[in-house]
């Protein structure tokens, strides 16, 4: 008789995920309090906001260091740098290229159907447009993907305990955390599935970080290029 394998939720890793994800959000609440509906006004809020171009990246970098160190000492990155080759990188680039195309045409369809606007900016990223470009690229192209992939892939997969179940937990929740319940979640679901699947394949977080970071950096440029080529968005 075949026994049913049981899976236990690892509460310790789940607690780490919740605590570190909360820590990840704190710099935004502190530095850009005036952008929030219920601002957290503290004695140093004005100082942080006035110096946001440095304060926000520095605080996020400190969070990233903490988020990297903890799983490193827990032994989660043992095989992360092994098995890399030109073919592996090329395969990731192909996946990235296909992802950019699919999300571009998805956005075009949503705009044509009146479900979105061509100048839509996620609520969570509104404050980034006030910062210097180099800091924007540093945050969305390096720090944020590293933090988010370690949290939503490494810790959440460890917390769930079963990678098949974790795939279907991490995938929609990550998208929902960025957009909430709105039609804007559709492109995020596509991105989330690809980066979650990339980690699911061999549990190497560098692959999902690479795709996530590259997408964040290249999606605006690729959208402009594709739009100039296809002339779909006015």
Image (cartoon, rainbow, N blue to C red):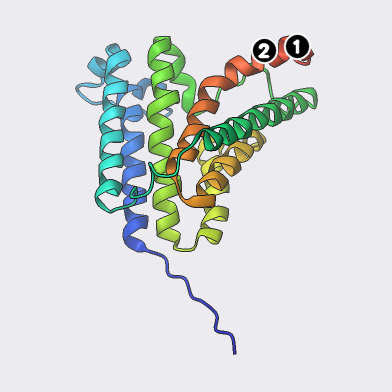
Q: Is residue 110 left or right of residue 140?
A: right
User: From this viewpoint, is residue 102 visible?
Assistant: yes
Rendered-image quadrant of the N terminus: bottom right
The image quadrant where one finds the C terminus is top right
Asked which secondary structure carries label 2, the reply is helix
Which residue bears the numbered disc 1? 229
Q: Image point 42% across, 17% down: which residue?
A: 136
The image quadrant of residue 117 is top right
- Of residue 1 and residue 133, the one placed in the foreground of this image is 1
Question: The residue tagged with tag 1: helix, strand or loop?
Answer: helix
Give the CA separation, mark 1 to mark 2. Answer: 6 Å
**Residue 131: in sight, yes or no?**
no
**Cβ–Cβ under 8 Å for marks 1 and 2:** yes
Q: Which mark is residue 20?
A: none
Residue 141 versus residue 51 in the image, above or below: below
> Horizontally, is 229 left or right of 71 in the view?
right
The percent coordinates of residue 69 (x first, y second) are 25, 42
Q: Residue at the location (79% across, 23% down)? A: 112
Q: Give above or below for 202 relative to 142.
A: below
* In the foreground, 158 or 87: 87
Disc on res. 225: 2
x, y percentage for residue 35? 41, 22
């Amino acid at each position: 008789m075949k026994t049913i394998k049981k899976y236990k939720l690892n509460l310790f890793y789940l607690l780490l995920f919740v605590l570190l994800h909360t820590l990840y959000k704190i710099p935004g609440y502190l530095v850009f309090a005036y952008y929030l509906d219920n601002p957290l006004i503290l004695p140093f809020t004005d100082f942080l906001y006035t110096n946001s171009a440095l304060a926000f990246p520095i605080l996020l970098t400190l969070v990233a260091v903490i988020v990297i160190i903890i799983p490193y000492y827990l032994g989660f990155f043992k095989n992360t740098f092994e098995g890399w080759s030109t073919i592996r990188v090329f395969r990731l680039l192909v996946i990235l290229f296909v992802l950019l195309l699919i999300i571009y045409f998805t956005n075009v369809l949503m705009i044509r159907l009146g479900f979105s606007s061509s100048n839509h900016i996620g609520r969570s990223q509104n404050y980034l447009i006030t910062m210097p470009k180099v800091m924007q690229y540093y945050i969305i192209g390096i720090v944020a993907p590293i933090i988010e992939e370690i949290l939503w892939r490494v810790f959440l997969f460890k917390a769930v305990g079963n990678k098949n179940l974790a795939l279907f937990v991490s995938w929609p929740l990550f998208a929902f955390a960025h957009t909430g319940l709105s039609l804007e979640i559709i492109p995020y679901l596509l991105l989330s599935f690809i980066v979650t699947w990339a980690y699911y394949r061999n549990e190497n977080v560098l692959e999902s970080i690479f795709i996530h970071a590259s997408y964040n950096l290249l999606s605006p440029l690729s959208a402009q290029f594709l739009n100039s080529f296809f002339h779909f968005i006015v």
